Amino acid sequence: MLVAYIVLNFVCCMFFFVEAIKWAMPAKRWAMIGLLMGPMVLPLFSIARHIQWRKAVGFNNLYIAA
Protein backbone atom coordinates (compact mmCIF):
# COMPACT_ATOMS: atom_id res chain seq x y z
CA MET A 1 0.00 0.00 0.00
CA LEU A 2 2.79 2.41 0.88
CA VAL A 3 4.60 1.55 -2.35
CA ALA A 4 1.51 2.40 -4.38
CA TYR A 5 1.24 5.77 -2.61
CA ILE A 6 4.90 6.55 -3.33
CA VAL A 7 4.53 5.56 -7.00
CA LEU A 8 1.37 7.67 -7.33
CA ASN A 9 3.10 10.70 -5.85
CA PHE A 10 6.08 10.22 -8.15
CA VAL A 11 3.80 10.04 -11.20
CA CYS A 12 2.05 13.21 -10.04
CA CYS A 13 5.43 14.84 -9.56
CA MET A 14 6.38 14.12 -13.17
CA PHE A 15 2.97 15.23 -14.46
CA PHE A 16 3.06 18.56 -12.65
CA PHE A 17 6.67 19.15 -13.72
CA VAL A 18 5.87 18.66 -17.40
CA GLU A 19 2.65 20.67 -17.27
CA ALA A 20 4.36 23.52 -15.40
CA ILE A 21 7.05 23.69 -18.07
CA LYS A 22 4.40 23.75 -20.80
CA TRP A 23 2.55 26.63 -19.11
CA ALA A 24 5.71 28.62 -18.16
CA MET A 25 5.18 28.15 -14.44
CA PRO A 26 7.85 27.38 -11.81
CA ALA A 27 8.38 23.69 -12.58
CA LYS A 28 10.48 22.69 -9.57
CA ARG A 29 7.93 24.16 -7.17
CA TRP A 30 5.04 22.29 -8.73
CA ALA A 31 7.04 19.06 -8.92
CA MET A 32 7.83 19.26 -5.21
CA ILE A 33 4.21 20.01 -4.32
CA GLY A 34 3.11 17.09 -6.50
CA LEU A 35 5.63 14.80 -4.81
CA LEU A 36 4.47 15.77 -1.34
CA MET A 37 0.70 15.96 -1.83
CA GLY A 38 0.00 13.85 -4.90
CA PRO A 39 -3.20 14.23 -6.91
CA MET A 40 -4.83 16.46 -4.28
CA VAL A 41 -2.99 19.40 -5.86
CA LEU A 42 -4.76 19.12 -9.23
CA PRO A 43 -7.50 21.73 -8.47
CA LEU A 44 -4.90 24.17 -7.17
CA PHE A 45 -2.74 23.59 -10.24
CA SER A 46 -5.60 24.16 -12.66
CA ILE A 47 -6.49 27.45 -10.96
CA ALA A 48 -2.84 28.58 -11.02
CA ARG A 49 -2.62 27.61 -14.69
CA HIS A 50 -5.71 29.66 -15.48
CA ILE A 51 -4.28 32.67 -13.64
CA GLN A 52 -1.00 32.28 -15.53
CA TRP A 53 -2.87 32.14 -18.83
CA ARG A 54 -4.88 35.24 -17.90
CA LYS A 55 -1.69 37.14 -17.07
CA ALA A 56 -0.20 36.21 -20.44
CA VAL A 57 -3.28 36.92 -22.56
CA GLY A 58 -4.82 39.73 -20.56
CA PHE A 59 -8.09 40.06 -18.76
CA ASN A 60 -10.01 42.10 -21.33
CA ASN A 61 -9.01 40.20 -24.45
CA LEU A 62 -11.25 37.78 -26.29
CA TYR A 63 -9.69 34.41 -27.08
CA ILE A 64 -11.57 31.87 -29.17
CA ALA A 65 -10.05 28.40 -29.42
CA ALA A 66 -10.65 26.65 -32.71
Image (cartoon, rainbow, N blue to C red):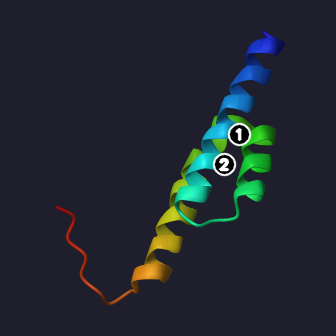
Q: Quadrant of residue 34?
A: top right
Across and down, in percent, residue 51 comes to 51, 72
Q: Which residue is mark 2?
A: 17
Q: Secondary structure at mark 1?
A: helix
Q: Amino acid at mark 2?
A: Phe
Query: With respect to residue 11, does 48 lie above or below?
Result: below
Residue drawn at point x = 40 percent, y = 81 percent: 57
Query: With respect to residue 9, does 57 lie above or below?
Result: below
Q: Quadrant of the N terminus?
A: top right
Q: Is residue 53 left or right of residue 12?
A: left
Residue drawn at point x = 71 percent, y = 54 percent: 30
Q: Check if mark 1's residue and mark 2's residue have beta carbons within 8 Å.
A: yes
Across and down, in percent, residue 27 comes to 70, 57
Q: Secondary structure at mark 2?
A: helix
Residue drawn at point x = 77 percent, y = 58 percent: 29
Q: Which residue is mark 1?
A: 13
Q: Amino acid at mark 1?
A: Cys
Q: Quadrant of residue 4?
A: top right
Q: Residues within 10 Å of mark 2 (few under 14, many from 20)?
A: many
**CA separation in Å, label 1 and label 2:** 6 Å
Q: Quadrant of the C terminus?
A: bottom left
Q: Is residue 33 left or right of residue 59?
A: right
Q: Residues within 10 Å of mark 1 (few under 14, many from 20)?
A: many
Q: Residue furthest left?
A: 66
As drawn, the label of residue 35 is none
Please state which of residues 49 and 28 is positioned toward the viewer in this rendering: 28
Q: Is residue 11 left or right of residue 60?
A: right
